[in-house]
Amino acid sequence: MKIIDSIIGASAELQAVRRDIHAHPELCFEEKRTADVIAAKLTEWGIPIHRGLGTTGVVGIVQNGTSKRAVGLRADIDALPMSEHNTFAHASKHPGRMHACGHDGHISMLLAAARHFAKQRDFDGTVYLIFQPAEEGGGGAREMINDGLFEKFPMEAVFGMHNWPGMEVGRFAISAGPVMASSSEFRIVIRGRGSHAALPHNGVDPVPVACQMVQAFQTIISRNKKPVEAGVVSVTMIHAGEATNVVPDTATLEGTVRTFTNETLDLIESRMRDIARHTAAAFNAECEFSFSRNYPPTINHVAETDFAREVMTSIVGADNVLPQEPTMGAEDFAYMLEAKPGAYCFIGNGDGSHRSAGHGLGPCNLHNPNYDFNDELIPLGATYWVRLAEAWLKRPRAA
């Protein structure tokens, strides 16, 4: 691997920053301390900053030369509302909050790149360092864009990166096209008519209506959607009743839908709405159907993906740059890729053997209470950011 020496030399400093942030996790749009830490480091290194986009976002501005060209590098900064099982020294000090997705490491990789940029600017143009809040369900990318991110900081392209447990350290994965799914939520309230459970003919029982809907929704995936197109409908909550001898008035279904294209999402939403309405009517019940589209699919642009792959190859070799298997997880970097060309990649986080003594007994998976980011990634991820920005600003502008 061709890792930048000065970044290796600063690894201990950035590891300390990462572990401090891990110990003080903050949820979406509440990342004030985290933003303060980021802003303080950038300021210490002489990098101008802008704060407040998306409530708690921070943008560092690194300029050199006279070129008006610019590229954006993005890291997410929020934690998850879950309790940590690890007991090592840098475990979360706040019950019910945890950096279980590695955003603390994403921050540190981009800060390590920022530190290098501050001391050695081997480019002509501007690198925007985007520290984005509220990725975990808050749509912080969308809010930063709505607050004028790309107007205030015009850039040709924007790139993102996420650690990937189970993939060997020293490897990247990237592919063009859809790499993460859209995320949508639905809620269906079925209104029947309550009665004594021993006299069900006196009422309209919403529970069998709900059961029929759950089964019928899967026929959308198996019989309405093209088999070659991916889609998931998961009913994850069913609420009905308060007593064993009472037919309830209502039953509520909630869950999530994941797709890689808006066309498939349109189909699923339309069919779910029709099935819910007509199934309820068939049982003399009524229903209220709501469908909320959260994150769109994350779709990598072809040219920018090819470019990023070349940069990765120059660092770790072609054998260590893998195809990026699409995942049904969602990512609000999708909003940035809708607005600007760019690409989103994975960087291997290893098998979990890196964890300090005192880690939980479970696996080192994303959104798992035993997870911890692998600090070995900091110099590699930072080197990728640096080489990507340098190469982008040196390449001829696209026609």
Image (spheres, rainbow, N blue to C red):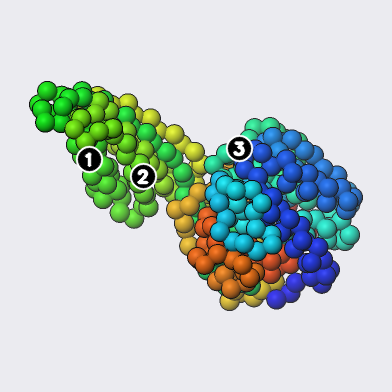
Q: Amino acid at mark 1?
A: Cys
Q: Which amino acid, by three-letter code, is at mark 2?
A: Thr
Q: Tag 2's secondary structure?
A: strand
Q: Secondary structure at mark 3?
A: helix
Q: Earlier in the sequence, mark 2 or mark 1?
A: 1
Front residue (pair 309, 215): 215
Number of marks drawn: 3
- Residue 95 lies left or right of residue 111; in this view the side is left
On the image, numbered disc 2 is attached to which residue? Answer: 236
Left or right: where 55 falls relative to 272: right
The alpha-carbon separation of the residues under discs 1 and 3 comes to: 36 Å
Q: Quick one: label 1 or label 3, which is nearer the N terminus?
A: 3
**Residue 282: x, y in percent?**
16, 29
Residue at the spot 21% in from the left edge and 24% down from the top edge: 194
**What amino acid is found at the position of numbered circle 3 in the picture?**
Arg
110, 2: nearer the viewer:
110
Disc ID at residue 84: none
Near mark 1 (Cα within 10 A), the count class, few <14, some 14-19 or many ≥20, is few
**Residue beneath disc 1:** 211
Regarding mark 1 in the picture, which secondary structure is present there? helix
Q: Residue at x 36, y 44 (%)?
A: 236
Q: Which residue is mark 3?
A: 142
Closest to the camera, between mark 3 and mark 2, is: 2
Say left or right for 311 vs 367: right
Q: Quadrant of residue 373?
A: bottom right
Q: CA distance from mark 2 to mark 1?
A: 13 Å
Q: Is residue 227 above or below residue 377?
A: above
Residue 62 in view in this figure: no
Tell me the residue at 69%/34% (across/down): 55
